[in-house]
């Protein structure tokens, strides 16, 4: 039996979302708001961002200016959020370093790149990076090298050295850390050295 769709019923199909206002028009509107309304709107926009995820003061400033708020309004909102404790770049940088190290095994220059992308001050970066001890880095490098070595099949010793070393280097480990962790892990495996 053939079913015909009635254009007036939705048959449980998802409804189309109404198109959001044009981004350029929204930016223009935000730029033309009177000061008091602009401050209130920027505050709400910043709070919406912070409801979803933690952010640095630089990220909030960037999102507000991208949304069309004047730089002075964005500066004022960021300053006020820092004063009341909603934004703390020191704490954000420390949290970011801890989570990226624990979840992804990032260290050194990989973490510095991540902190730079988030707009963290270099002085705060050094403080945040100091949380990770050389012993923790070495242990993490070894664990990551073991994990990578398990995925390598039918490769020669030099190929395994290159692949594991490159993998660790992308995570931010120094060349000496890469070499040491790779040699330790590959010493336990049966390879024919060439």
Image (cartoon, rainbow, N blue to C red):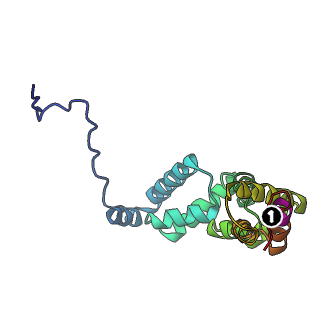
Does the magenta-highlighted stretch encompass residue 185?
Answer: yes
Q: Taking 81 as reference, is 132 left or right?
A: right
Could you tell me what secondary structure mostly forms the magenta stretch? helix
Quadrant that contains the C terminus:
bottom right
Quadrant that contains the N terminus:
top left
Residue range highlighted in magenta: 181-186
Residue 181 in sight in this render: yes
Question: In which image quadrant can residue 107 be found?
Answer: bottom right
- The picture places residue 142, in percent across and down from the top left corner, at 82, 58
Does the magenta-highlighted stretch encompass residue 85?
Answer: no
Instruction: Using a 10 Å C-alpha cutoff, classify the residue at mark 1 as few (fewer than 14 neighbours), some (14 to 19) or many (20 or more).
Output: many
Is label 1 in a helix, a strand or a loop? helix
Residue that carries the numbered disc 1 in the rendered image: 129
- The picture places residue 181, in percent across and down from the top left corner, at 83, 64
Depth order, front residue of 42/167: 167
Q: Taking 68 as reference, is 4 left or right?
A: left
Which residue is farthest right? 135
Which residue is farthest top? 1
Depth order, front residue of 67/192: 192
């Amino acid at each position: 039996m053939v079913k015909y769709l009635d254009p007036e019923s939705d048959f449980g199909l998802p409804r189309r979302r109404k198109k959001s206002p044009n981004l350029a028009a929204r930016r223009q509107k935000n730029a033309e708001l009177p000061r008091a309304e602009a401050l209130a709107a920027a505050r709400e926009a910043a709070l919406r961002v912070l409801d979803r995820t933690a952010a640095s003061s630089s990220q909030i400033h960037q999102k507000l200016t991208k949304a069309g708020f004047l730089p002075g309004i964005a500066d004022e909102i960021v300053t006020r959020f820092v004063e009341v404790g909603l934004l703390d770049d020191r704490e954000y940088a420390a949290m970011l370093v801890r989570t990226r190290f624990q979840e992804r095994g990032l260290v050194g220059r990989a973490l510095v790149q991540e902190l730079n992308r988030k707009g963290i001050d270099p002085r705060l970066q050094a403080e945040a990076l100091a949380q990770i001890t050389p012993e923790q880095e070495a242990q993490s490098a070894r664990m990551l090298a073991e994990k990578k070595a398990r995925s390598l099949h039918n490769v020669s010793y030099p190929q395994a050295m290159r692949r594991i070393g490159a993998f660790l280097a992308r995570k931010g480990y120094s060349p000496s850390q890469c070499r040491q962790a790779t040699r330790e892990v590959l010493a336990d495996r049966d390879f024919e050295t060439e």
